[in-house]
Image (cartoon, coloured by chain):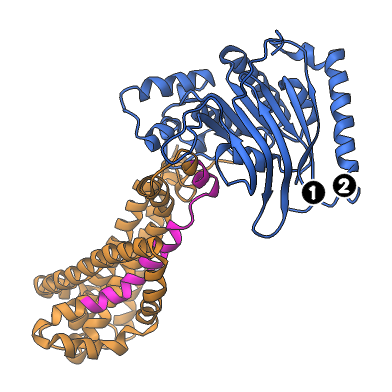
Chain colours: A orange, B blue
Amino acid sequence: MIGALWSKHSRWILPVAAGIAFLTFWEWSVTAWKIPKFVLPAPSLIAMAFWSDGPSLLGSLWFTTRVTVVAFLAAVVTGMTLGVLFTLNRTIERTLWPYAVVLQVTPVVAIAPLIIIWIGLDRLWLALLILAWIVAFFPILSNTTIGLSSADHGLKNLFDLYGASGWKKFRYLQLPSALPYILGGVRVSSGLALIGAVVAEFAAGSGSATGLAWRIIESGNMLNVPRMFAALLMLSAFGIVLFYATMWLQWALLHRWHESEVKREN
Amino acid sequence: MDDGSVPARPLVRLKGIRKVFSNGTEAIRGLDLDIMPGEFISLLGPSGCGKSTALRMIAGLGEASEGEIEWPTAMYDASGKPEREIGFVFQEPTLMPWATVFDNVALPFTLKDRPKGEVPDRVAEALKMVGLERFAKSYPRELSGGMKMRVSIARALVMRPKVLLMDEPFAALDEITRFKLNNDLLDLWNKQRWTVVFVTHSVYESVYLSTRIVVMAARPGRIVGELGVDAGYPRGTAFRTSQPYNDACRRVSELLDDAMAANPAGIDEH
């Protein structure tokens, strides 16, 4: 009875217990070893920073969230569209593929100043959006391209046999075959969109970009390390939400049929 | 065909077929074959004899390099292509893993733009034929290998084709499942009497199933002999152990030995 309960709930009891133990040790060690709060603040101080700076930090979270989510959605739409175009037309693929690769291999920090100058500091959010999009876009493009051309050969023959039109081949064969690949790209891309947004805010380093990354720099400059921790925690919480949202999407679309989401008993 | 009334006009006529692949391999040379309505005809031969290639050409997958494939009784469309009323069963079940059994069997209707109204009844009918009426909502991964092959057969039959083309359909299955599917296929054919062209490399399977066996040799692929199996239907386990069955198996084996002897090197090239 207790064994069954334990095996059912140990998945969350264990990490929560470990977390509480760690926080207790942290709180104790900071006082015992007299660590200054601008090096390592006690958890209780961080909690107080949450309480006092919470509303303004939430505003910053909202700013970063908007940039991340809009850039991510733009990456999904443009990546899939271009991936479909590449598959339909080899000439377009040969022409544009090298430029997509250039976008991918150029570190975003390096092009950030240029993009910010071009777009202008008065429209900084747009510059951040473009930078986050550049980072998030490539995995979707490359996975869509691979996925669309990986349909089973026997099924292609079958579709030919019944004289399927190009559109029907795309709709009923290529797109479903590509779905697991595209969703893999979506998962990678969602994390990259957040990284892109944060890096872009760091690179902008200006007052009108009031996202969480900027708050971290600002708190660092003022040696307000508790607030820095609070902003950091919010950022990772948002990252986790994003991660699980895409995990859920993948599960919802694939669990009936795809090997990656199928539970097997031996 | 055991009653001796052979119709005059073949359903499919292969005339002087030659097939050369783009890499220069001559897969088939000088193939002549008439396929009569209601026949259960097996193409038997070693790998590389072009039996699958011939079957795919009948289906319209790949053009012949020389010669013609005629459908004397079929309608021809404006571009001169015959309305082939065929169903095709591949060696693999070739099902869409993302679609239910129902949607997989309904695929020919989806691709051919047929009115949707009759689809549920026709799919149910096809699934009933192969004994899977309770699995319409299942996904392919939930089925065994034999059941997947049954779905594949149901899909091939759902348009009520005149000719069922089968490319080593049971080769990947275990023997018990294969015997069961052999029997079920024969029952269906005996009831409906469509024409079946069945590609196999098993002597026993070809004799058990067919009214006529066409033996082919490799390099280049060609017909080296044929044999009618006179035994009537239904055929069952008793037929598998009967004297006529054994005699037919021996004669087909001899033909196959001759076919192999024609290529003494016996190198298996693909």
User: Mark 2 highlights which residue?
Assistant: B263
Which residues lie in the magenta part?
A: A130-158
Number of labelled discs?
A: 2
Q: Is residue B27 magenta?
A: no
User: Which of the 4 image quarters holds residue B125?
Assistant: top left
Q: Is residue B215 above or below residue A63?
A: above
Q: Is residue B249 above or below residue A251?
A: above
**Residue B149 in picture, x, y percent from top left:** 58, 32
CB within 8 Å, label 2 to label 1: yes
User: Mark 1 highlights which residue?
Assistant: B219
Q: Nearer the viewer, residue B219 or A26?
A: B219
Name the side, left or right, on which B86 lies relative to A121: right
The quadrant the N terminus of chain B occupies is: top right
Q: Nearer the viewer, residue B120 or B58?
A: B58
**Residue B238 in picture, x, y percent from top left:** 78, 11
The answer to whether tags 2 and 1 share a subunit is yes
**Residue B133 in picture, x, y percent from top left:** 47, 20
Q: Is residue B251 above or below residue A64?
A: above
**Residue B263 in picture, x, y percent from top left:** 87, 47
Can the viewer see residue A77?
yes
Q: Is residue A265 above or below residue A242?
A: above
Report the residue at 56% width, 37% height from top: B59
